[in-house]
Image (cartoon, grey):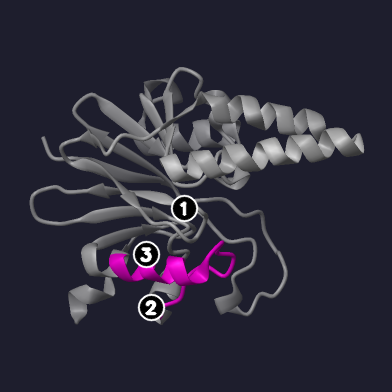
Amino acid sequence: MAVEYRIISIGTLANHLLWKETAPVRTQHATTTLIEDDSRRILVDPSLPAQVLEARFFERTGQKLDSVTDVFCTTLRPDARRALPALPHARWWCGEAELEWYSRELLAMRDSAERLGSADAEGVEEDIALAKRFQPAPEKFTEQISVYPLHGATVGCTGLLLTPATTTIVIAGPATATREHIEKGMVWEHCADKDQAMESFTDLLELADVIVPGFDNLVFSPRRWM
């Protein structure tokens, strides 16, 4: 059986600079994708609020979220994982570098909040507990689903590479934001490290036939027409 994938929800940027939007005009959420291979049903970036994603998932698959076996987050940014409370039965994964970086950031935030007596301390503790549920992703989930590092957009941004017989598909997360960014050869404006993000973006274009961006519908790689 060949690996299959389906867009559950198309993401969007809060403000799309290439549409000349200079301030937030909508709620940002990441593109959510379901990948199926044998018994694995991997939901990537469950970004919508849980109730909304539950309805969208049923619309797109005819099934409920309890059929998901694994969650994979390309980034641990809060706007990529809003629906995690609806997926306690699944195994949670992300790239090892992202998990290590985010865990360090949370510990530093907790120390700061405690020193300052900040009201944010409770929220930080909740995020620390959530991060502890994540495991570093293996190099491969199945023979046709591999982890693909795309560092730079976030410190440890990590995608998934799907390799059915005749094509390569990369679920890229914020390593590339939208179709317009791909067409213009641009990385996401909010990258943690723009030089590293551009290296990852260049590698992505050389490898992928089909790209699922972080905040848009899937697109064909420009190299198909070169």
- What type is the residue that disc 1 sits on? Ile
Query: Which residue in the structure is indicated by mark 1?
Result: 10
Return the x and y of residue 181 as percentages of the image width and height. Answer: 45, 73
The residue lying at 27 percent from left, 75 percent from top is 222
Mark 3 or mark 1: name the one nearer the start of the chain.
1
Q: Which mark is drawn over residue 200?
A: 3
- What type is the residue that disc 3 sits on? Ser
Q: Which residue lies furthest to the right in this view?
A: 117
The residue lying at 55 percent from left, 58 percent from top is 12
Q: In which quarter of the image is residue 206?
A: bottom left
The residue lying at 44 percent from left, 46 percent from top is 74
Query: Which residue in the structure is indicated by mark 2?
Result: 183
Left or right of 95: which side holds 49?
A: right
Left or right of 140: which side holds 23?
A: right
- Magenta span: 185-203
Name the one closer to the observer, 139 or 216.
139
Q: In this view, does 31 lie above or below 3?
A: below
Q: Do the residues labelled 1 and 2 touch (CB within 8 Å)?
A: no
Return the x and y of residue 221 as percentages of the image width and height. Answer: 27, 69
